[in-house]
Amino acid sequence: MPSRSRNREILFLISDVGRLLRTYADHKARQFGMTRAQWAVLLRLERREGLKQSDLAEDLDLQPITLTRLVDRLCESGLIERRPDPVDRRAKRLYLTPAAHPLLDRIAGPIEEIAENVLTGFDPAEAGVLLTQLELARENLKRAIAGKTQDAVKRYG
């Protein structure tokens, strides 16, 4: 198989795995009366509490209005809260409430179950290599996107 074809197959496979993972996570999240997107917000805040809404939207690759609606629902549910940014009065930072922690504890099991099902048969040593390679791919994509954005600004801005 030529290198170009193999590279293309890798990209298709990454895309398929991501799509199937989202579908599987949607199913698991519904069992908790939530959406995968709500899970993603809570899990990201668990890792990086105090994010600005704009930064969280970028991290999750969501439009700001879409994230605002998600955050509104999670605030109404008492799981997260918005606090003013001490430096930028227009910005809000997001924090988990005490009520979110028991829920995060409850969803930890199903998330581990997802991981176990997806990674069944993976050699732990090879999984480490795969993790490193996927992180590299993510950084390459971020650089490529940033480069395109800068080119567009130079041309049109």
Image (cartoon, helix red, strand yellow):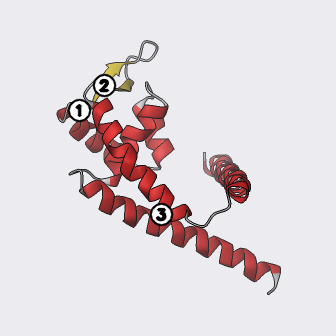
Residue annotated with mark 2: 82
C-alpha distance separating marks 2 and 3: 35 Å
Viewer-proximal residue among 96 and 121: 121
Question: Mark 2 touching mark 1, by CB under 8 A?
Answer: yes
Under circle 1, the secondary element is helix
Q: Quadrant of the N terminus?
A: bottom right
Under circle 2, the secondary element is strand
Mark closer to the chain start, 2 or 1: 1
Crowding around mark 3 (Cα neighbors within 10 Å: few <14, some 14 to 19, many 20+) is few
* Above or below, comparing residue 69 to residue 116 in the picture: above
| Residue 73 seen from this side | yes
Viewer-proximal residue among 29 and 138: 29
- The residue sitting at 53% across, 68% down in the picture is 17
Viewer-proximal residue among 82 and 155: 82
- The residue sitting at 48% across, 35% down in the picture is 55
Mark drawn on residue 117: 3
Which residue is most to the left? 76
C-alpha distance separating marks 2 and 1: 8 Å
Given the image, on which type of amino acid does mark 3 rest?
Asn
* Above or below, comparing residue 7 to residue 153 in the picture: below
Mark drawn on residue 75: 1
- The residue sitting at 20% across, 51% down in the picture is 33
Question: Mark 3 touching mark 1, by CB under 8 A?
Answer: no
Which residue is most to the top? 86
Given the image, on which type of amino acid does mark 2 rest?
Arg
Mark drawn on residue 128: none
